[in-house]
Image: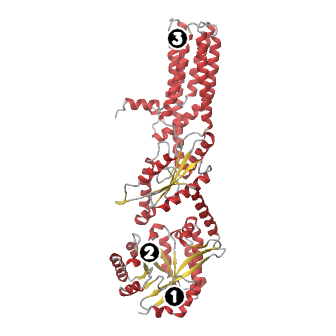
Amino acid sequence: MRTRPTTFLARLFAGDLSVFGGPATDEATAGHIRAEQMSLVLGYSVGIMLANACNAAVLAIALRHSPDGIFALIWAVVVAGAAIGFGLQSHLSRRITKPQFVSRRAMHRLVRNAFVLGAAWGIVPVAFFANAFTGGQLVITCLCSGMLAGGALAFATVPIAAIAFTTPIFIGIAICLGRDGDPAYVLMAVLVVVYGSVLLRAVFVNSFAFARRIIRQVEAERTVRRDPLTQLPNRVAFNETLDAALKRLTLSGEEFAVLLLDLDRFKEVNDRFGHPAGDEFLVQVASRLQRCTRAAEHVARIGGDEFALVMANLTRPEDALEIAERFVAAFTEPFLIEGCEFVGATSVGIVLVPRDGNTALDIMKNADAALYRAKKAGPGTVRFFEEADDKVSRDRKALQADLAGAVAREELFLVFQPFLDLDENRITGFEALLRWQHPSRGLVPPSEFIPIAEETGLIHEIGEWVIRRACATLKDWPDDIRVAVNFSAAQFHNTGILQTIVQALADAKVAPARLEIEITESMLLSKYGSAASILNALLELGATVALDDFGTGFSSLTYLRKLPFSRIKIDQSFIRDMLVQPDCAAIVKSVISLARDLDIEVVAEGVETADQLDYLRQINCDEVQGYLIGRPVSAEGAQALLDTKKLRAIFAA
């Protein structure tokens, strides 16, 4: 396929080395090569511009007595002034952090400036050589030769800029030396051509070697700084980009924004389709997000389902909001996951720098606070950081710090909610529920501190404490009473949990069959690595397993076949509405019928009225739990319920 002339010229003046037979690259790598080329040119430019100013002054002095002395002086003042100005600008640019990407337009400007400077020196032999005295001619010859060599050095990695700079000088020399046909001048012209050819060849050889070295460097850096799954920059690359933006802020006052994204339904993809499908979902998300950004900016994947973007050179907050809204809109079209359409969503938190912080720690803390508020507002929400977010974030951090010592300070305790067997009208066990009595905040709801425990890993210490305390309490109850303990998905990442359970049962001298592990549909086994092996080991030990919140997930029926569940617990949302909504009643009856066929007992959660209890008796539900049966009570209160057998009389058929 032939390249269009306009495309060829665009590549040529952008410094694309493949035009000259050099290595071909993608635009991202080409932009990085241009950044390195520009950095080197700026590094040489201060010295080169000072040399230009000095050369212009020398030329003006050498030609001061020639007929063109006034014009030479004017020329020298203009060139020296421009050189000094450009040198100062280059010096300031060098103080700012080196960019990781330079656009084609910036390279076009470099080539244009190289041509203008070369043309300024190309005028010298044409305008001043003929009327100059012998000494002046010698100075002109030396200066033009020196500028050719200096230009080749300055643009040693950018052939098109070297050509743009040297061509006007070559033409000027050719015009000058060809005027009177003097053989000596012809020999000088030949020497200039030879030396120029050698210089340009060296430029090409050096630039090709330079480009190949940068390409190898980029590939090596991508390995370290790329997320292997999505091929986006990883946390390391993001932190470097953030540090560079902070340095530019300090040196030049360039403001920027940080956008923090979290996928709202990623866990649902994993639960519904499995981890391989979750990985494919992340790849599709990464592709869509990257299409929303500007050319020189890259979304980074900094966590499992968390992405971030440093938006440089921010002129107004609305620009950051526009990008954030593009991110949200990117999820409008469904994703195709294993042949099924899935509608995802993302929430975005935005911080404006330096308004919302001027250190990496403060920026990310505030971005996380803004994101937290966005997620609480619902899927697909964008929120800028506000001062109130900082208070919420500090409160959350303080709660996290307090939770770390809650076990040691004995602030955690268990309460127990009874299960009632409908056939025998007796209590058959209790569910152990965790509570936290904070010394200053009072009773902290589990919905507040359990997510913090899971995020920080404290759930492992707390979970082990719950198991030991539940088993220690169970040993004082009759042998036909069980205790159910809720397990978090995060606990299955701790392979030591099995040994903890075995040891707790042994210390309390409690039969394993009296311990029931409750898991939810959202964390069913094969999705969580070691969970399957741990639960199978518990089943072999003799413990029982209950499937909690049945009916709210996607894989329940599949997993009823994979694991020998002892019980399933029908979610309270179905129990609450079963007497007023026929579909809920149908679901409850179907679950009970299915469970009987599979020889699995059923527990109905959230029973609060006598009518609900009567209906569950009629459809042969095995056990019930809820405020009608009994609210959560202390271990002593649970013992009292067992001693008085009060429930037998109250709920007799």
In the image, residue 269 above or below residue 124: below
The answer to whether residue 365 is seen in the rendering is: yes
- What colour-coding does the image apply? secondary structure
Residue at the spot x=44%, y=32% of the render? 11
Query: Label 3: which residue?
Result: 176
**Disc assigned to residue 549:** 2
Badge 1 vs badge 3, beta-carbon distance below 8 Å: no
Earlier sequence position, callout 2 versus callout 3: 3
Earlier sequence position, callout 1 versus callout 3: 3
Q: Amino acid at mark 1?
A: Ile
Callout in the foreground (1, 3): 1
Residue at the spot x=55%, y=13% of the render? 125
Q: How many marks?
A: 3
Circle 2 crowding by C-alpha within 10 Å: few under 14, some 14–19, many from 20: many
Query: Label 1: which residue?
Result: 481
Residue at the spot x=60%, y=17% of the render? 76
Q: x, y (%) of residue 290?
A: 45, 48
Q: Amino acid at mark 2?
A: Asp
Distance from disc 1 to disc 3, alpha carbons, whole Å, reads 110 Å
In the image, residue 500 above or below residue 249: below
Earlier sequence position, callout 2 versus callout 1: 1
Q: Amino acid at mark 3?
A: Cys
Front residue of 198/142: it is: 142
In the image, residue 229 above or below residue 53: below
Distance from disc 2 to disc 1, alpha carbons, whole Å, reads 22 Å
**SS of the residue under disc 2:** strand
Callout in the foreground (2, 1): 2
Distance from disc 2 to disc 3, alpha carbons, whole Å, reads 93 Å
Q: x, y (%) of residue 604?
A: 42, 81
Q: x, y (%) of residue 649?
A: 47, 94
As drawn, is 329 to the left or to the right of 363?
left
Callout in the foreground (2, 3): 2
